[in-house]
C-alpha cells in the first residue's frame, strides 16, 4: 500500500499556490520502504493519474548457529534485534524475528541492495549479510555461539589482581 500526497506548486515567498492553473506534484510514499516516487508538473484538471512505482520484494530468512541449528528464543522474549539498511542510504528498518529464528521484511525496492545486521540473541554473537537483494531466496545468517569464561585473575604471587586489569580471551 502507498500513500499519495498532493503537493501544490509554491513560491518560496508566497507559500502554496492557490492558482488552479499552476502545475503541481504528487508523491507516492510506500507504507514500508519500497522507495518513493514523485511526479512533478501535473496539470490541474487531469482526470487520470498513472503512478509507476518501483517493483517491491521481501527479504526473508533464518538465523542459525554454526551447526545449522535455528537460533531460537522463548516466546515473548524481547531480546535480539535484526536491522536492514539499503546500502548507501543510511536508513534503517527494524524487523521482528519470530521465536523460531525466521524473519521477513516489509516490501523493499528490488532495485536496491541491502545489508542485514543481527545481534543481542542470548548465547550468540553478532551476524550479518551484505549485498542482499529482495526476492524468493531465503537468507541464512550464522550467529556463532558464545561462551562464558569464569575465573579469578591473580598476579605473579597468586594474589587477586587489582580491578580494571584487562583480560583477553
Image: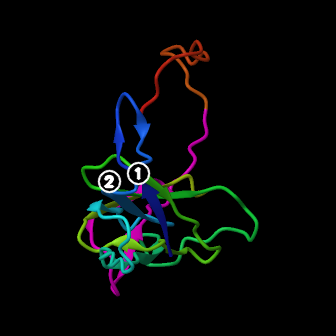
Q: Tag 2, which secondary structure?
A: loop
Q: Tag 1, which secondary structure?
A: loop
Q: Is residue 93 above or below residue 14?
A: below
**Residue 132 part of the magenta-drawn span:** yes
Instruction: Determine the image quadrant of residue 135.
Output: bottom left
Span of residues in magenta: 124-151
First in sequence, mark 1 or 2: give its number.
Answer: 1
| Colour treatment of the image | rainbow
Q: Is residue 10 above or below residue 104?
A: above
Is residue 169 visible from the viewing direction of this image?
A: no
Q: CA distance from mark 1 to mark 2?
A: 8 Å
Q: Nearer the viewer, residue 93 or 97?
A: 93
Q: Nearer the viewer, residue 108 or 67?
A: 108
Find residue 25 and report its horizontal and vertical position in percent. 34, 58
Q: Residue furthest right?
A: 76
Give the crowd class for mark 2: few <14, some 14-19, many >=20 residues within 10 Å: some
Chief SS of the magenta region: loop
Find residue 19 and report its horizontal and vertical position in percent. 39, 50
Residue 8's disc number: 1
Task: Determine which residue is flagged by label 2.
Answer: 22
Find residue 27 and report its horizontal and vertical position in percent. 39, 61
Q: Residue at x 36, y 80 (%)?
A: 48
Amino acid at each position: 500500500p502507498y500513500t499519495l500526497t498532493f503537493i501544490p506548486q509554491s513560491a518560496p515567498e508566497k507559500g502554496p499556490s492557490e492558482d488552479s492553473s499552476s502545475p503541481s506534484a504528487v508523491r507516492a510514499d510506500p507504507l514500508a520502504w519500497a522507495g518513493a516516487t514523485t511526479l512533478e508538473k501535473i496539470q490541474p484538471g487531469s482526470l487520470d493519474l498513472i503512478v509507476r512505482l518501483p517493483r517491491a520484494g521481501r527479504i526473508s530468512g533464518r538465523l542459525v548457529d554454526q551447526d545449522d541449528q535455528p537460533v531460537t528464543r522463548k516466546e515473548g522474549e524481547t531480546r535480539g534485534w535484526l536491522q536492514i539498511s539499503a546500502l548507501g542510504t543510511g536508513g534503517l528498518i527494524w524487523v521482528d524475528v519470530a521465536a523460531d529464528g525466521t524473519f521477513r521484511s516489509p516490501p523493499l525496492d528490488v532495485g536496491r541492495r541491502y545489508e542485514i545486521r543481527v545481534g543481542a540473541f542470548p548465547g550468540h554473537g553478532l551476524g550479518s549479510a551484505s549485498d542482499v537483494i529482495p526476492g524468493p531466496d531465503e537468507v541464512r545468517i550464522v550467529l556463532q555461539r558464545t561462551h562464558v569464561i569464569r575465573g579469578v585473575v591473580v598476579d605473579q604471587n597468586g594474589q587477586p589482581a587489582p580491578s580494571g586489569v584487562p583480560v583477553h580471551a
